[in-house]
């Protein structure tokens, strides 16, 4: 026998409960039109992920319960659906209490025991519910803050096939809820996910799914949400894996998708807790999604940045963006990401040369803007810089050609960066365009970005991208067609921008490697210390650099935490990003 | 019989393990000198609280275990001590494994099961350990991210008196670990805390302690850490409560303290798990700390702000601070807090008048600085403002006396605020002084502070102080002597600053109430929505304001979340502060 199953990889939005109901109904109807017996949605479909402290509001939880009932009532008959939602001890959806769907049934959410749950909907009814057992509470996850775990497997017979229902991290333990569901007879496991992207994560997901599938002889349908949400981005990349551990179907990466596929299952008799009819019309033709090619490792990051940037901007009401173009690699990559995310005509490059800017800073920026097809403005900061210097007088040393021969320090460098931030923000306030910041992870690590200067802005696409990966991204974009909404192909990032030595150009003849080790060394130290939690001694023992170099970089990393706390959000793409993913004290006596 | 007990209210610092060992040994020796049988320290004494992701580093955890052994070895003989530390399943301190104190015993902390523990030290040995059961994971707390709960009560016989050992939140459940320890015979309960201050919290702590004491007929020694740590401040305020529920001794508020007191206990025979000698010399005289008067509710907040500001500055290496003085109430209160925290000669007031500044903005600021005895600088922003306006040309409308008759908008207002931020940061970079920001909670709530403008700085003393409380604080300081390091008494905040209508002075004749409801209404809406999680409907039903006003303010609050994410830290003083205490998405479709 066959179960026709649809993987509904939707872009559920945080807090947009009504919109999420519409997204579910739309995908559900399309799945029904293709004869699906079952359509599997994503984790916390109703609320989006992560809803954070919205969960403390009783009205929000009540609206989410009401949404499940609306989906059940309005969904197409004959095709079952599994949706994620927030459960409450009081609101048992199956034995429905009218008080629940009518409005808040509890006085205070803080006292409410909530569950991260999935509901099986069929023929107008909520037929069964499942509550997540394994609640992640590390990295970017805070589920123990909100949810109570429940250890109760669920198997539902859909069109005669016993289907086990599980949620996300339930997959990441062995045998866990998947094994328990298989023990109870499940032949197909639905696993609803909100799994944020980072490099290499697919291999972990598939390895876990294959482990369960091979152990139990089950099919595993892994369905992940898609889209950017503040400092994470969900890649979708849903898949169906067979009992042999092989991937049989895949959904798109970083885009909404609906994959309908027939799963062959030997007929068996199972005493499932709940049985629903499942009237999918399997005689209809189905487009089989075999093991489609995936993006290469760098292209994957490019798509992550573009999707994250687009969703952050659009979902916060920004159609247009502003970027300070220095002629350097970081602002060039951010501009190309923004052009792909928003369309080049929605991105303005702002050139803000100073007396210390090189000629190529302007020519490279103009070449980039020309290749991308984006408009530019040029604002010279020389006169405001002088006016500020005059006001500061003897209090701050400004200018490199002073009669007293004194040399300015970091204050004057930051002043230039902050004047640029001020000009960008003035344009932003006047036009309503968002400023995208251009700093990369290597800079944020050691504090080489200027607070309120080049760190000023609403979103930081490269915040979790180390410098060497910025170069890889530039080369990838030059060699590949524009993804998403981008329309500029070919060598959009000037080769001279890629080839020249990196410099902040805040003093004459400045270069990054005047005061930092080469990026090959710096990035390796940052990866070891920040991502892998290695100690100074470990990093030295690996031969990455001498102890004095490692110790100095680690001190820079620790001391820059106060800056990063004031940084704009940016999408996580590595195994440990700054921000929500890495929570360290600013005030700390530990330095190792 | 009598147990002479010392409440060691120390200022353990996060990450400063060696320093915390010294703090413990110093207090322990002083307690021994006063003949104490037992000295009780604070939660996570070794690591400080909260250590956050430092706990993921194996070297950090190993250093903390080593610290417990050093304390035991170096502590005075005869007096027992209870200290907080991070426990590991591998590192059983009592049956000591040499591998543990010799260095990291595990390869990866991420896989390590950690406990929030307390160790009983006596006569050179770790004689017993206890692991916290109740791990708070709400508000500012993230203990489920790091620790595993353990349900195993501990009673130790010290000088013949059975003492139960518990940690912090263990107190906040009934009967819980305190009841369990009493059932096992404990007559005195030691409760080690790291309990952040907020208004009114003492009543909750004492109510819980009294509930246990009266129920079980026990004495409860509540010992809390003291000092500021990033966005929380610990008030100390330790106490000893008797079996009748009455407070018998109190430690200082917001200061280190060591309180030694005799606890009378009827002799009983108890089969305690561990018995230590306890050789305290009870014949020595003891200063009894009866129920000393506490600070009044506003003075308590003043002390919280001063202690938080002092510790943030000093522990991050800043001896000096800069504050932009506008002549308004917020900057005046911040200046007075800073003067009390750092000494007036370590605080510079920077006056930055614009063409739209009133005369009284300068005269009030000068009066304040004179009364506090702090130096000032005056930097006129008119010319840089013009120079920036010239560069922006037609792109941004600047100036109120334009020939084309156009009126500038928020861009020009923010430009003024940002030029001031830029000047302050230039002075900060040149001198190494920290900039203290002046925004209050009401402003941060509705987004009326300017990002990179008056929000620019390293610490925000008033971040969790609603505007009406700012006024109360000003009046309190004028009526009370200078606390801590302050030396200016009397009316330091000019009455005209308190009495004049609040204005940002970013356009002619501007007043806050041009665009906001009166602060009596605004603060009530913010308190209802942010602190109490009430819905718009609830707030309207309470009669605070009409629905359109409440809805507009709630929208402003939601939309300003992106700004608050880039705000400097400031100390929590209410039941729910912005930041770590209130975690809401920036991108959200929910608006209720």
Image (cartoon, coloured by chain):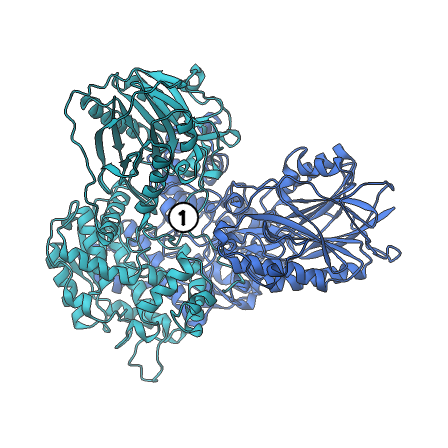
Chain colours: A blue, B cyan
Chain ID, mark 1: A
Q: Is A133 above or below relative to A283?
A: above
Viewer-nearest residue: A96 or A204 = A96
Which residue is at a point 63% across and 39% down the rendered structure image?
Answer: A151
Q: Is residue B227 above or below residue B363?
A: above
- Answer few, some or many: residues within 10 Å of disc 1's Cα (few below 14, many 20 plus, some between 14 and 19): many
- Which quarter of the image is occupied by the N terminus of chain B? top left
Residue at 84 percent of width and 47 percent of height: A160
**In front: B143, or B537?**
B537
Judging by the rendered image, the residue that carries numbered circle 1 is A564
Q: Position of residue B72 (x, y in %)?
A: 32, 19
Question: Can residue A488 be seen here?
Answer: no
Q: Nearer the viewer, residue A454 or B177?
A: B177
Q: Position of residue A245 (x, y in %)?
A: 76, 37
**Residue A191 x/y as whole percent:** 69, 45
Side (left or right) of B451 relative to A440: left
| Relative to A515, B38 lies left or right | left
Residue B19 visible in the shown view: yes
Q: Nearer the viewer, residue A563 or B141?
A: B141
Secondary structure of residue under mark 1: helix
Percent coordinates x, y for residue A308 in the rendering: 56, 55
Q: How many marks are shown on the rendered structure?
A: 1
Which of the 4 image quarters holds residue B21? top left
Write the residue at 38% across / 67% down: A426
């Amino acid at each position: 026998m066959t179960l026709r199953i649809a993987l509904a990889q939707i872009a559920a939005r945080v807090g947009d409960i009504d919109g999420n109901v519409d997204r579910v109904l739309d995908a559900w109807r399309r799945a029904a039109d293709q004869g699906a017996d079952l359509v599997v949605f994503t984790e916390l479909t109703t609320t989006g992920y992560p809803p954070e402290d919205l969960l403390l509001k009783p009205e929000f939880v009540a609206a989410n319960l009401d949404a499940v009932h609306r989906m059940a009532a309005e969904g197409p008959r004959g095709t079952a659906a599994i949706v994620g939602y927030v459960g409450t001890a009081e609101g048992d959806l199956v034995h429905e209490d009218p008080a629940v769907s009518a409005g808040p049934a509890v006085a205070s959410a803080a006292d409410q025991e909530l569950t991260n749950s999935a509901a099986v909907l069929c023929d107008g009814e909520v037929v069964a519910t499942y509550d997540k057992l394994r609640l992640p509470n590390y990295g970017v996850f805070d589920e123990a803050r909100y949810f109570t775990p429940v250890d109760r497997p669920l198997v539902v017979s859909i069109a005669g096939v016993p289907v086990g229902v599980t949620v996300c991290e339930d997959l990441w333990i062995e045998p866990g809820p998947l094994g328990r569901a298989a023990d109870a007879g499940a032949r197909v496991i639905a696993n609803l996910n909100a799994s944020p992207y980072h490099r290499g994560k697919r291999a972990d997901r598939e390895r876990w799914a294959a482990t369960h599938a091979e152990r139990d002889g089950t099919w595993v349908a892994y369905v992940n949400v898609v889209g950017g949400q503040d400092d994470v981005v969900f890649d979708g990349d849903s898949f169906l894996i067979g009992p042999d551990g092989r991937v049989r179907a895949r959904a798109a990466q970083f885009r909404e998708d609906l994959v309908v596929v027939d799963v062959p299952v030997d007929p068996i008799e199972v005493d499932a807790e709940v049985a629903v009819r499942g009237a999918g019309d399997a005689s209809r033709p189905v487009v089989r999604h075999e093991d489609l090619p995936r993006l290469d490792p760098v292209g994957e990051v490019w798509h992550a940045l573009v999707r994250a940037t687009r969703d952050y901007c659009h979902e916060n009401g920004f159609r247009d963006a502003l970027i300070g173009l220095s002629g350097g690699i970081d602002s060039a990559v951010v501009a190309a990401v923004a052009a792909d995310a928003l369309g080049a005509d929605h991105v303005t490059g702002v050139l803000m040369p100073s007396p210390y800017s090189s000629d190529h800073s302007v020519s490279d920026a103009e070449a980039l803007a020309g290749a991308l097809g984006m408009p530019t403005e040029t604002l010279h900061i020389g006169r405001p810089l002088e006016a500020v210097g005059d006001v500061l007088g003897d209090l701050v040393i400004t200018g490199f050609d002073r009669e007293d021969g004194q040399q300015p320090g970091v204050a004057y460098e930051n002043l230039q960066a902050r004047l640029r931030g001020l000009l960008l923000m003035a344009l932003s306030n006047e036009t309503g365009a968002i400023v995208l910041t251009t700093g990369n992870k290597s800079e944020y690590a050691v504090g080489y970005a200027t607070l309120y200067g080049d760190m000023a802005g609403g979103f930081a696409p490269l915040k979790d991208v180390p410098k060497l990966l910025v170069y890889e991204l530039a080369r990838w974009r030059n060699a590949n067609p524009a993804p998403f909404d981008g329309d500029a192909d070919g060598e959009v990032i000037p080769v001279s921008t890629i080839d020249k030595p990196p410099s902040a150009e805040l003093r004459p003849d400045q270069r990054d490697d005047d005061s930092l080790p080469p990026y090959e060394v710096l990035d390796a130290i940052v990866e070891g210390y920040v991502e892998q939690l290695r100690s100074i001694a470990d990093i030295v023992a690996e031969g990455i650099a001498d102890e004095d170099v490692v110790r100095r970089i680690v001190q820079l990393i620790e001391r820059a935490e106060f800056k990063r706390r004031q940084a704009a959000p940016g999408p996580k793409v590595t195994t440990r990003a700054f921000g929500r993913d890495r929570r360290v004290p600013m005030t700390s006596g530990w330095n190792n």
